[in-house]
Image (cartoon, coloured by chain):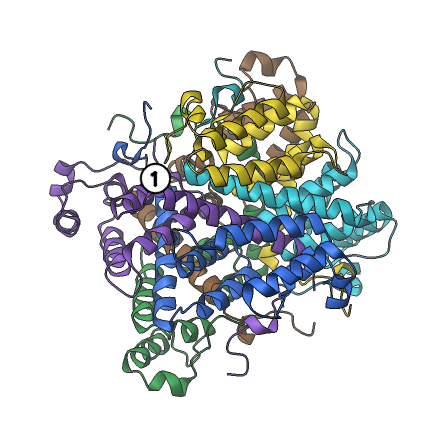
Chain colours: A brown, B green, C blue, D yellow, E purple, F cyan
Amino acid sequence: MATVTLKSDAEAEADPRVQAVFSDIRTTRGSDFINNFWRGLAHDPALLERTWTGLKAVMGPGTLDPLTKELIYIAVSIAIGCPYCIHSHTAAARAKGLTSGQHGEFLAVVGMANQTNALVNGMQIPVDAAFKVGEGS
Amino acid sequence: MATVTLKSDAEAEADPRVQAVFSDIRTTRGSDFINNFWRGLAHDPALLERTWTGLKAVMGPGTLDPLTKELIYIAVSIAIGCPYCIHSHTAAARAKGLTSGQHGEFLAVVGMANQTNALVNGMQIPVDAAFKVGEGS
Amino acid sequence: MATVTLKSDAEAEADPRVQAVFSDIRTTRGSDFINNFWRGLAHDPALLERTWTGLKAVMGPGTLDPLTKELIYIAVSIAIGCPYCIHSHTAAARAKGLTSGQHGEFLAVVGMANQTNALVNGMQIPVDAAFKVGEGS
Amino acid sequence: MATVTLKSDAEAEADPRVQAVFSDIRTTRGSDFINNFWRGLAHDPALLERTWTGLKAVMGPGTLDPLTKELIYIAVSIAIGCPYCIHSHTAAARAKGLTSGQHGEFLAVVGMANQTNALVNGMQIPVDAAFKVGEGS
Amino acid sequence: MATVTLKSDAEAEADPRVQAVFSDIRTTRGSDFINNFWRGLAHDPALLERTWTGLKAVMGPGTLDPLTKELIYIAVSIAIGCPYCIHSHTAAARAKGLTSGQHGEFLAVVGMANQTNALVNGMQIPVDAAFKVGEGS
Amino acid sequence: MATVTLKSDAEAEADPRVQAVFSDIRTTRGSDFINNFWRGLAHDPALLERTWTGLKAVMGPGTLDPLTKELIYIAVSIAIGCPYCIHSHTAAARAKGLTSGQHGEFLAVVGMANQTNALVNGMQIPVDAAFKVGEGS
């Protein structure tokens, strides 16, 4: 069930731009597997290219370690409520070394954050002056 | 502006349960500063106690490092839209060593996660079998 | 700060449809006070009429008591993140008898609901058969 | 799977108010098809009437074209995360002429909006004076 | 489909902390049924204990009646978009006496709250001074 | 109040990458005005470049008209709850010709979409087979 069809490999090969992105995904990940997200995006080659290029840049090597980035990604996906994203990035986090113990601890932090966010919003707490940046700059 | 008043130190001292939590916050953090969230919660001593106890357990030492936990907290706060929480946990992350470069990279991951979540939800992509856990177990 | 101007009483009097709604709000509530929400909506008389008519029907006498309805309203407003709505419906709940103790207990329920929702979504728990209605009907 | 049963045509015929709404939906849309949303709402005839009357007024002829209204509807449904709504309004948009190319462009706008919203919220950017309306009015 | 496996009774019995929580759930509810949420949480005994203890305290006897608390819980779950939570707490509300008529009225309030929240946020209505608490305190 | 400082023109000139983006924004928009969003993003030149490049591509000429794209943007911003985004894109929509009447009609659609989304999620309505795309493909 989806609002678009998913492109098969044969269909992807018929469009050079889609084919190039699929090929780069396979090379970058060292795996032949192309997950459904990219097969759906393939209907709009420009959007597919921009999304893959952006994701590759953002999730690639940087100052935060790869597992931390995946945990941030899952936290966002839980708060937004995207079942596919939660599944795919939890699988990615496991592939990057997430242990069962860390997963439980991660869920505890996410649960606590959702709880205190609701309490703060419910009370409409004003921001402490100590937390503000760039006043007067 | 708030939906509750914020308890001053003098008011907190009038209730032993509130006083005990405020004292533990100061000891745990090694600082005399009590931010507005706890001053708002102080209207309900039982809720104050449960929230502080839970937060202390979840954000304390474990298998994820303290800065990673703060980044997860901020990611949730951005997705939910809690200005106070974003301010307070960004300040906490900076106090735990978050650099300006890491902050930018963190925001890039959060922005990308929000973008791809929306694309996935818009297309209603079905979960790949490879991402599912515990089928048949 | 707003994306529309707020209609003053003088401006409202210039449009019979707006004037009629403002008059009914005052009669229904037994107060001369028209809060900013209605002054903003007054730019679109048809939307103003539909919204007030719907709100009056939904929040009026029924099988749920008026305070319970206000608490449901605040719970939604916290989850969505609408500062105006949280403020206005908390004030309305207080006017309908909400005590400080009930407010704390209400916030505790909302906080717990946000926490367990996040845990459930994070684990993507399948719905127990016992909770499903209307299977086979 | 649902929290209410869905009313069949036979059940709908047993209640004149439900029957009248179902009949008007069929006439308005020029189709015999009644989708599940209305069959679920039929448990509360007053809510069914108010919802259909409101939807008919809002989505009917006006100053915005029908396809634009459907795209606005889908954008909201994606941000909220309502799979049924995304499916039904994407189908409605296609019936009103949405092309595959426009769908891709629409998704790109929605994705970009979600990304920049997250960046803005993460930085807690203050609103530029130039964007404010109605100051001093 | 889930991101964790669900613990069977046999697996739960192998961990005394899990076993103790499961036992207390059964005693508290007067039923042998343990729903999937707790079976998923059982992977992290500390999180399981904290969550059950918190839920039991918050949803137990207090100044708000049990059915009102369930309605608040469902309202949050709808706004966040957690299908499991909506199903489980609607079932719980029915078990606590929610009638079909009250369910319809509840949904009407939730629908109206979502509508006016969106209108308020769209117009960015400033909070009336009359709704603010604790100014100057 | 923000979690980052906003770069002044003088500070922007000190970094060639930031300067190049600011210059392109001015040329593209035919205005010297750089709004606060870009001044905040300027702390991370790579993120600034990617975001501006993406936004320019997505909001530029295509198969959807520019005003429709702005309305989609505002709809997302309202649902997410980003005050800055609502203000800036409502201002942009007005600059592209949005009339007061269209604004009211737009808000009515957004309000209705939020209402019916909540009703659908509350009832957990199953997707009609007629709305599904790509089954069996």
Quarter occupied by residue D102:
top right
Asked whether residue A124 is in view, the answer is no
Quarter occupied by residue A119:
bottom left
Please tell me whether residue F43 is drawn above or below residue D18 in the rendered image: below
User: In this orientation, which residue lies closer to the viewer: E58 or D25?
Assistant: D25
Quarter of the figure with the C terminus of chain A: bottom right
The location of residue F10, given as percent across then percent down, is 80, 65
Asked whether residue E5 is in view, the answer is yes
Which residue is drawn at the image coordinates 67% and 63% (left, top)?
D126
**Residue linked to disc 1:** E87
Q: Residues within 10 Å of mark 1 (few under 14, many from 20)?
A: many
- Subunit ID for the residue under disc 1: E
Which residue is drawn at the image coordinates 54% and 52% (left, top)?
C55
The residue type indicated by label 1 comes to: His
How many numbered tags mark residues here?
A: 1
Instruction: Specify whether B14 is left or right of F21.
Output: left
User: In this orientation, which residue lies closer to the viewer: B44 or A28?
Assistant: B44
User: In this orientation, which residue lies closer to the viewer: F121 or A37?
Assistant: F121
Please tell me whether residue E73 is drawn above or below residue E87 in the rendered image: below
Which residue is drawn at the image coordinates 57% and 34% (left, top)?
B119
The location of residue A50, given as percent across then percent down, is 65, 34
Instruction: Specify whether A68 is left or right of D126.
Output: left
The location of residue D26, given as percent across then percent down, is 58, 23
Q: Secondary structure at mark 1?
A: helix
Please tell me whether residue C67 is drawn above or below residue A31 in the rendered image: below
Which residue is drawn at the image coordinates 32% and 81% (left, top)?
B19
Please tell me whether residue E59 is drawn above or below residue D57 in the rendered image: below
The location of residue B127, given as percent across then percent down, is 43, 28
